[in-house]
Image (cartoon, helix red, strand yellow):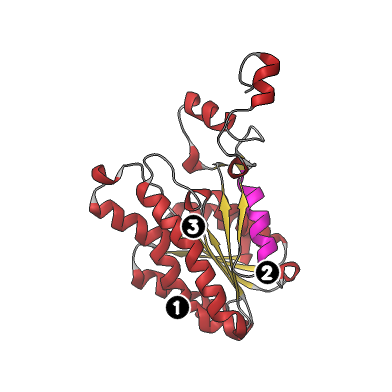
Amino acid sequence: MKNKIVLITGAASGIGAATARNFVAAGAKVFASDVNKSGLQVLIDELGEAVTGHQADMSDRAQVETMVASCVERLGALDVLVNNAGVGSLARAVDLDPDEWRRVMAIDLDSIFWAARVAMPHLIASRGCMVNTASISGIAADYGFTVYNTAKAGVINLTRALALDYASQGVRVNAVSPGLIETPLSVMRPALAEEWESRIPMRRKGKAEEIAAVIAFLASEAASYITGQNIVVDGGITAHTGQPDVPGFTSTGSMPR
């Protein structure tokens, strides 16, 4: 990745910040975008001149398009676009404010479409690639996450559509679907955290660095024949039917934790 130009959205914390660290360590130049200006500055202070910061609200089409144009103008090219910015929302359909639906869809899904339209000519020129952060919540549904489920499902199929349309021009497009990850956005009540982790076969949250490693792989030459794929990184939770651990139950008299 030496001297490759990588644009990362949602770069100020969590998976985005871990991804920026990975690319910088591999020799890339990172254009880090986030709505959180102070968080970006912390990242720049940590990683130094290899990172260029840019503040943008991903719910605003004009700001997303300006972000991509600014990256190319300031750094001279674009080799990798990592669409990582996202927000959640907890509400069932009847209770969900239509403005909240529109906000989450804009940030989680529309921003990838907007960025892809502007970035694609540059990615074609560099024979580059795109990696989108989706979610296991885009593969199946969760109670009360109506708009988040819908948006992330859209990310996965938008990834496939872009991959098909631009494969012949040398651009690869893939998605990563994390499960529960330890980030500033995953803070929850202790009882809920314990219950959630008990349902994960590996019995723990994932780490942001574990998702960043998969993103780095998909952006590398090691993944040169991979496109249109959604890589699930979830500690095994989507491998489970949801039915009880029968051997564990019958041998102990209670469900294993």
Tell me the CA gap for discs 3 and 1: 19 Å
Question: Which tag is nearer the camera, tag 3 or tag 1?
Answer: 1
Question: Which tag is nearer the camera, tag 2 or tag 3?
Answer: 2
Element carrying mark 3: loop
| Between discs 2 and 3, the one toward the N terminus | 3
Q: Quadrant of the N terminus?
A: bottom right
| Between discs 2 and 1, the one toward the N terminus | 1
Which x, y percent locates residue 130? 57, 70
Instruction: Name which residue type carries label 2.
Output: Ile
Element carrying mark 1: helix
Mark 1, other Cα within 10 Å: few <14 / some 14–19 / many ≥20: few
Q: Which residues are magenta?
A: 207-219
Contact check, label 2 and label 3, Cβ < 8 Å:
no
Tell me the CA gap for discs 2 and 3: 24 Å
Q: Quadrant of residue 204?
A: top right
Q: Residue furthest top?
A: 253
| Residue beneath the point at 52% across and 84% down | 121
Return the residue at label 3.
10
Mark 3, other Cα within 10 Å: few <14 / some 14–19 / many ≥20: many
The numbered disc on residue 117 is 1
Mark 2, other Cα within 10 Å: few <14 / some 14–19 / many ≥20: some
Which x, y percent locates residue 51? 59, 64
How many marks can you see?
Answer: 3
